[in-house]
Amino acid sequence: MKSIQYIGSASLAWLASFGRGGLFLFQVMFHKPKSLSSVFSLLFKQIYSVGVLSLVIIIVSGLFIGMVLALQGYTILAQFGSEQAVGQLLALTLLRELGPVVTALLFAGRACSALTAEIGLMKATEQLSSLEMMGVDPYRRIIAPRFIAGLICLPILSIVFSAVGILGGEFVAVGWLGIHGGSFWSLMQQSVFFSTDVVNGIIKAFCFAIATTWIAVFQGYECEPTSEGIGRATTRTVVLGSLSILALDFILTAAMFGDF
Amino acid sequence: MRSKQLELFVGLFVVLGFISLAYLAIQVSGLRTIGNNNTYQIQARFDDIGGLTERAKVSVAGVTVGEVDNIVLDKELYMALVTVNIHSDVTTIPTDSAAAILTNGLLGEKYIGISIGAEEEYLKNGDELYDTQSALVLENLISQFLFESTSGDNE
């Protein structure tokens, strides 16, 4: 009897956190800013810390993933004598899958964990409540700029990731393995379509951005105001963020590229 | 000063994003839809199109002059009715030209090759190519070969 009651209370708490998360997102999105210039200066600061500082890890990992893909693709395709198709393989995997997904996973680990810890610490040191006491809305001043910065940065980072990955793959395939550059590019251009492949990748990145950044700011805002609580909230951000990225990726891929 | 530097970095970040997007658009996907809008349509009926798909290329003497627009089944003749967009600067395809479905390399994609006829009149929008040659289906070829070799044994 007790265990069934426990299951009931746990699922109710789970549903309630979903509801609170939804209300939270609504409040973040529909709070009108007082003046546009103050919003922009807050937003710039967040884009700098969320986007610009993530650029190094994105570029380096994009370069290596592109190079590894070209190398692996070459060894398999060379068995069928069609090693020129490496360009096609590289561009399609990066644009459709790896670009958005790996960028979002790195983003969840690099930027979203920092967002949670930052907001959690603000809550633990009672900065959020003192802001409220001064008549400053914490949603408007703290949460909204971080959320919107995440929405702007992740798609840009994913585009940069794909471009750098293709450059790295081209370096390995054409420069090192000696595939003919013309056929590499022409096969790639024949099979990649801007309106489907590139744009769908950007849409995916945008959906992942909504999910991970929402989880990050909500976990920070909801966390227990102790040092342990901040640690747990940060872990939850990375775990839940990564899981929701992978699950969303399956749904989006089925909707975009599946034939039903 | 601090804020100016910040804005500079953010600006560079956004510019980098746009450069990457332009790179993906131009170099990687080759954005061919622009500039090819002026086309005219011709049609051809094939017995069997094999693996021909929409947007497959159409070539004359190996040069791409257009692409396949759509493929439907002609319900009366049970043939595949293929509509093809030809670039409007290629105006001199004779009316008695022949269309064949060919394969690019051993495992490559299917495309339509047009071999030029001798007629003085040229194809216009909505015309049809009557001289067509179907795709080579490997299974048919193999069964034909087997059938011929066994019938040879009987003689």
Image (tube, coloured by chain):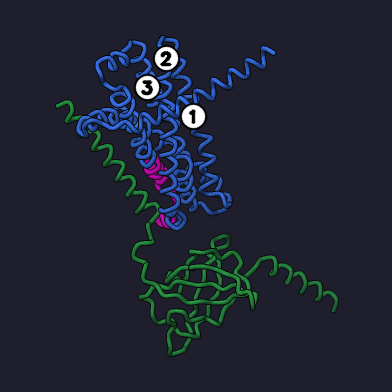
User: How far apart are the alpha carbons under marks 1 and 2?
Assistant: 18 Å
- Image coordinates for residue A174, horizontal then vertical, percent: 41, 48
Tell me the residue at 44%/36% (across/down): A208
Considering depth in this image, is A97 or A181 the residue closer to the camera?
A97
Q: Between residues A58 and A220, which one lies in front from this camera angle?
A: A220
Q: Position of residue B108 (x, y in %)?
A: 54, 61
Q: Nearer the N terminus, badge 1 or badge 2?
A: 2
From which residue to which does the magenta span run?
A161-186
Please report contact status of discs 3 and 2: CB closer than 8 Å, yes or no. no
Residue situated furthest bottom in the rendering: B120
Where does the N terminus of chain B fall, quadrant-wise? top left
User: Which of the two residues, B123 or A65, is positioned nearer the viewer here?
Assistant: B123
Figure quadrant of residue A116: top left
- Residue at which label 2 appears: A230
Q: Colour of chain A?
A: blue
Tell me, what hue is chain B?
Answer: green
Quarter-of-image position of residue A107: top left
Q: Which residue is mark 3?
A: A114
Please tell me which of labels 3 and 2 falls first in the chain.
Answer: 3
Chain that bears disc 3: A
